[in-house]
Image (tube, rainbow, N blue to C red):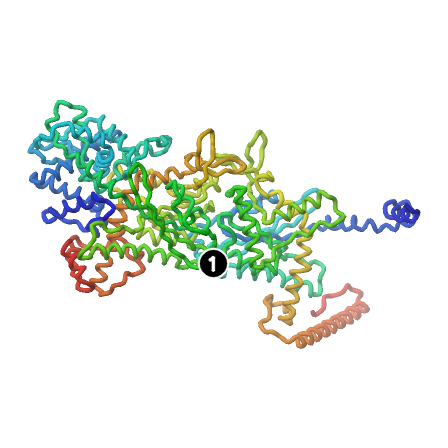
Amino acid sequence: MSQADKMKQGQFSNPETPGYVGFANLPNQVHRKSVKKGFEFTLMVVGESGLGKSTLINSLFLTDLYPERIIPGAAEKIERTVQIEASTVEIEERGVKLRLTVVDTPGYGDAINSQDCFSTIISYIDDQFERYLHDESGLNRRHIVDNRVHCCFYFISPLGHGLKPLDVQFMKAIHNKVNVVPVIAKADTLTLRERERLKRRVLDEIDEHGIKIYHLPDAESDEDEDFKEQTRILKASIPFAVVGSNQQIEAKGKKVRGRLYPWGVVEVENPEHNDFLKLRIMLITHMQDLQEVTQDLHYENFRSERLKRGGRLSSHGYGPEPEEMDKDIILQEKEAELRRMQEMIAKMQAQMQKQGDGEGDGPHVGKV
Amino acid sequence: VAGPALLLKIDLRSFEVEDVDTSSHLSPGSRRTTSSPHRNAMSPTSIYYRDLGTATAAATNNNNLNYTQPRSIMGGGGSKTPEPVSRRSELSIDISSSSSKQVDNVTSPASARFAANSAVKRPEVLGHSKTPEISHKREVTFAKMPTDSPVIRRIEGNNNNNGTSRTPEQNHARKFEAPRSEVSLSHSNMSESTKPHHPNPQGKGEKTHGSDFSYVGIDAILEQMRRKAMKQGFELNIMVVGQSGLGKSTLMNTLFKSKVSRKSVQPNPEERIPKTIEIKSISHDIEEKGVRMKLTVIDTPGFGDQINNENCWQPIMKFINDQYEAYLQEEININRKKRIPDSRVHCCIYFIPPTGHCLRPLDVEFMRRLSKVVNIVPVIAKADTLTLEERDYFKQTIREELRANGIDVYPQKEFDEDADDRMINDKIREMIPFAVVGSDQEYQVNGKKILGRKTKWGTIEVENIAHCEFAYLRDLLIRTHMQNIKDITGSIHYETYRVRRLNESNGHFSSHASDNPADQPKANGQPEGQPSALQANGVAAQHEALSHEM
C-alpha cells in the first residue's frame, strides 16, 4: 500500500492522525438525536374479519393493542360500514422509543355488498396525506406529526385458491398510495405444499393484475453476506404466510408461543412452521425504508396530484378541490398567494420591529 | 302420490288410499299446524292405524299387524324398557278380540322404523320367522316383548342403515352411540313403519319356541321389501354451498369415499372464480354390499365470492324450486311414471368459513331464506384452523345467532316426532354445526391407513373424533338420518311448495312459481281436506286429476 493510501485510511479511522476532520461522527449524532426524538410508524391492517389481524399485531409487537375488544355479531355487522380505528402505543426497547400507530379497519369485507367498503379506507389515507401536506406548507413546521400510513398489511385468506375479486380491487386502489405488503393469514390451515401453491398463485395474480406491492430493496453491495442472504430469503418468501398467537404453550419441554391442537403444536416463532419471524424481521429492518418510500414515492405522488388538481390549500377543507384548473392558473394563483404571504410576513416583521423598538417585548403573534 | 325413492312409501300409500275414506285424511299442509299432524307427516299410516285401532277391530289383519309389531319391538329397547311397556299398553290393537295391551302407540315412528329397519336389513333375523309355522290364528299377542330380543335386534339393526349394510366397526367412542343404535334403526326407513314386519314373531320364535303356532309370517314382508329396495336402489341429492376454497368438493369425496365431486369430474380443473353463480349437478351411481345409490352432488361455484353478493342465493332458491316444480309436474300428470325420478334437493350442506368469531351477514341471510325450503346442515369448514376452545366458542356463537335469527337447521325441532327422536336430535343439535376437515389423501399412522392432512406439526386424521367431527357428520347424513332427511324433504318441504303452487294456480291462474317461498312459512292455514277440494280451474286438467286422486 502506498503511503497516500495509508494516510487516507488513517484519516478516517484514527482520530489521532492529522487530517482527521471528525465528520465521521455524524451518524452517531444522528443516532443519538433520533433515539431522543423517537420513531413514528403507522401501520394499517386490512382484511376480512376473523383472519387473525389483531392477534398478529399483538404477536408482532408483543403488546395487547386491543384490551377491551368486543366482536359484534352478524346482525350488527349488517348495519355497520367500514370504520377506521387507530390505536397508538408507545413501545420502548433499549432506550429507543417507537410510537406505533396501528390503523384497524373493522367491517372490511363483512357486508354482503362490499362494493364501497374501501372508499372509507382510501379517504382515510388521503386525509393523512392531505393533513401532512397542509402542515408542510404551513408557516410553523416545527412539530409536524407524521400520521401518514407507512405500510399496509393486506391479509389474504388461506382458504381460497388465490386472490378474491375484492382483494384485487382493493390492492389496485391503494397500491399507489401506500406500501402494500400481502400477508397470508392463518397459515396453519395449509400444508407446506398447499402453502407454496398458494404463494405462487398469489404472486401470479398480483403480476397479472399489475398490482404494485412493496418490494424489499436489494441489499447494498457493502453489506455483509449474512444480511444479503437474509434479504434474499425474505424476498423469496413474499407473501409471508404467518400464524399469530400470544399464548404460551409447553412443547418439547420448553415454553413457546403457539397454538395447541389435538394433533400437534404450531409454533409461531419456528421458521419451519410459518413465516412470522421473517415478517417481523422485514418490518423491523425495513421500517426506515418503508418510511422513506412513503415519503419519496407515495407522498410525492399524492402531492403532485393534489397540487395539480386543487389549487388552494384551504384550512377548512381537507378534501381536494373539485374542479380541474389550468396549470397556468394554478401557478398564478400560487404566486399570488406567495406574494400575499410574503407581504403579510413583511408586515408582521415591521410590526414586531416597531413593538420591539417600543416595548422590547417578545414577538407577538401577528394577524395571520 | 308416492315418491320413487322409497318403494315402501308407495305401498304404504296404497294401503292408505284404500281406507282413506274411512279415516280422516290429514293433509300435508295441516301437518305442520299441530303437533300430532307432525307425526302424521312422518308416518301417516301410523295415525291412520291408530284410528283404526281405537275405532274398530275390524281393520284388516294386515294393517293391524303392521301397526302393532313395530311397537312391540321398540318396547324392548334398552333405555326405553320401562317406558315402552306402559306405552304399549295404551293402545290396544284388536287383532284378536283379546287386545294385546302391550302394543305400543305406533306414533313412535322410531320404534316402528326400528323394527322395520331391523327386519328389512337382516335376512337372518327374518330367517327365524320362516321357521315357525304360519298357521297362526289371530291370537297374536305381541304381548310382552322379551327385552332381550329387541336388544339383539337393535344391535343388529344398528349395522344396517338405509340398506347400506356396513360392518359394525363403528367407532364406539362416539358420543351418541347408544341412542344412535336406536336411531339408526328408527330413522332409516320411516315410511316402512307400518309395513315393516316386526321381528316380534321372531323374538317370540327365539325365546318361546313352544308358541310357534302363533306365528303368521308377516315379517317375511320385510325380506320382500328389502329385495325390492336392493333392486331399485336409492336416490340422494346433496347440495353443497359455500365460498370458493372451503373444501366442499374434498368433503364430498371424503364422505362417499369416491370421487364424486365436481372437481374430480372436470377434465381441466381450473380454479377460477366464476363471475356469476353456477349450479352444477353431477350424478354418480355408487354401490356398497349390493345396495345401489344414485348420488347427485349439486355444486354452486361462485356463491359468495363476488364483491357484491346481494341476492346470490336467488339462483340457488330458483334451482331448488325448479326441482320441486319438476316433481310436481310429474306427479300431476295423467300418465305418470311408476317411479318419479326424484331430483329434489334432499339436503343442503352450508359451509361456514372458520373465522372463529361469528356468522357473517351473508351466512345469516342465506340460511334464513333457505332453511324454509330445504334441509340445511351447516358445517364449519376447514376446522383444523381452530383450536378446541376456539371451536367451542365459535359453535356456541353460531348456535346463538341461529337461534336469534329464527333459523331452523336440520334436524328441525318441530319435526321431532316423539321423545326418543327429540332426545337423539337434541344431542345432535347440541353439536351442530359440525367442525369438519376433509381429505382424500391417505397416510400411514400407527400402522394403519387413514385419511388425513399431513403438516409439519402433526397429522390431522379425518375420521378421528378427537381431531374433527367429520365422523359425526357422516353418520348423520348417511348412516342414521338419511331416510329422515329424504322424508322431511318429501313430506314437508315439497308439500309446502306443492300447496302453495296449487293455490296459486288455483287463485291466480298463474303458471309461474314465485321466487319467494321464504315469505311463506309452513303454516299455510289450510284446513284439512282442502287440497282435495282444489278445483284446478286455472291451469290444466292435470290439476283436476290430482284433486280427484287426493
Residue A45 percent coordinates (x, y): 57, 52
Instruction: Tell me: residue B311, above or below residue A247.
Output: below
Q: Which residue is mark 1?
A: B307
Foreground of the two, A23 or B454: B454
Instruction: Judge left or right: residue B456 versus residue B292.
Output: right
Please indicate, yes or no, whether residue A308 appears anywhere in the rendered image: yes
Residue A51 percent coordinates (x, y): 51, 48
Specify the quadrant of the image occupied by residue A361.
bottom right
Instruction: Tell me: residue A309, above or below residue B466.
Output: below
Please indicate, yes or no, whether residue B423 appears anywhere in the rendered image: no
To which chain does the residue with label 1 belong? Answer: B
Foreground of the two, A26 or A179: A179
Q: Secondary structure at mark 1?
A: loop
Q: Residue furthest top?
A: B210
Residue B43 percent coordinates (x, y): 20, 43
Instruction: Judge left or right: residue B352 versus residue A239.
Output: left
All told, the count of numbered labels is 1
Residue B37 percent coordinates (x, y): 20, 46
Residue type indicated by callout 1: Ile
